[in-house]
Structures are given as structure tokens and as C-alpha cells.
Image (cartoon, grey):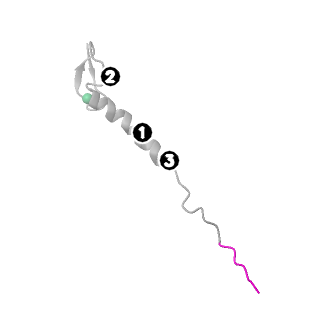
Amino acid sequence: MKIKCPTCKKWTEWKDNPFRPFCSERCKLIDLGAWASDEYKIEGRPEDEAGPMPSEKEN
Ligand SMILES: [Zn+2]
């Protein structure tokens, strides 16, 4: 039985394939990396935490 790799669209053997449905470990990591990088984009950071400086007058 042969399957088509979702990453590179290459026909590969299903039997004895530890990376199925991918043809190789590389294609598997590419697919996992695709959604992982999307998740990193969502993560945001506060740009400035410093509030306005209080001005005090001494006399
Ligand atoms: Zn592939």
C-alpha cells in the first residue's frame, strides 16, 4: 500500500514507515513546525511597562 506524503506530495510506502503519513522524519518535522511557528506569532509582549514619572516639588 502506498500513501501520499502531505508535505512533499511524494508517494511513499505505508508499511514499516515510522513517519507515516509522512515519507520521512524531515517532512514530519516540517508539518509540525508549520503550526508551531503560527502559535509563536500569537504570543504578544507588553511594549512598555514603565508608567508616567511622578513629578514632586520640594520647597
Ligand atoms: Zn515527504
**Residue in the image at 53% along x and 54% along y:** 45
The three-letter code of the residue at mark 2 reads: Pro
Where, quadrant-wise, is the C terminus in this rendering? bottom right
The mark lying in front, picked from 3 and 2, is: 3
The residue identified by callout 2 is 21
Please determine whether, in this image, residue 31 is positioned above or below residue 52.
Answer: above
Give the side of residue 14 with respect to residue 42, left or right.
left
Q: CA distance from mark 3 to mark 1?
A: 10 Å
The residue identified by callout 3 is 42
Q: CA distance from mark 2 to mark 1?
A: 19 Å
Task: For mark 2, give the secondary structure.
Answer: loop
First of labels 2, 1 by sequence position: 2
First of labels 3, 1 by sequence position: 1
Q: CA distance from mark 3 to mark 2?
A: 28 Å
The residue identified by callout 1 is 36
Task: For mark 3, give the secondary structure.
Answer: helix
**Residue in the image at 43% along x and 43% along y:** 38
The three-letter code of the residue at mark 1 reads: Ala
The mark lying in front, picked from 2 and 1, is: 1
Ligand 1 - quadrant of the structure image: top left
When asked about the image quadrant of residue 9, the answer is top left
Determine whether the beta carbon of the residue marked 3 sits less than 8 angstroms from the nearest atom of ligand 1. Answer: no
Give the side of residue 2 with respect to residue 55, left or right.
left
